[in-house]
Amino acid sequence: MKKAYFNGMCDKLTQISQLPEPERTKTIDFFMCQAYLFLDLTEKQISKLKEIFKMFYPDIYKEYDKPDENGYTAEFKYLQFK
């Protein structure tokens, strides 16, 4: 079941990359939040998803991985709720 979700998420990431800004960044943020909080993916699956994200969409990943005004990345904030 998790593998099906994971494969679907990789497909969804491809679809999201086609959106214009600012919808793309907002959607990526929501998408990654779901990956961390709701799908309960394994660390290995999350790492693979991030690698795909970085490899194919480096400009989006750079924005996603940028720390906020307090120095926290989106990933750090998601993991606080897990």
Image (cartoon, rainbow, N blue to C red):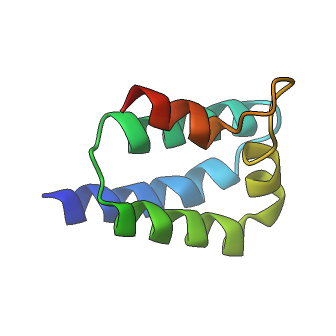
Q: Which residue extends farthest left?
A: 1
Vertical side of 39 occupied by 45: above or below: below
Quadrant in the rendering for residue 45:
bottom left
**Residue depicted at x 57% and y 71%:** 52
Q: Quadrant of residue 8?
A: bottom left
The x and y percentages for residue 17 are: 68, 54
For the N terminus, the image quarter is bottom left
The vertical placement of 75 against 1, above or below, is above
* Quarter in which the C terminus is drawn: top left
Q: Nearer the viewer, residue 6 or 68?
A: 68
In this orientation, which residue lies closer to the viewer: 6 or 64?
64
Tell me where residue 9 sits by quadrant: bottom left
Residue at 41%, 44% in the rendered image: 35
| Of the pair 75 and 1, the residue shown nearer to us | 75
**Residue lying at 81% horizontally and 54% vertically, measured from the top left:** 62
* Viewer-proximal residue among 68 and 50: 68
Position of residue 8 in the picture relative to residue 48 (left or right): left
- Residue drawn at 59 percent across, 39 percent down: 76
Q: Is residue 16 left or right of residue 12?
A: right
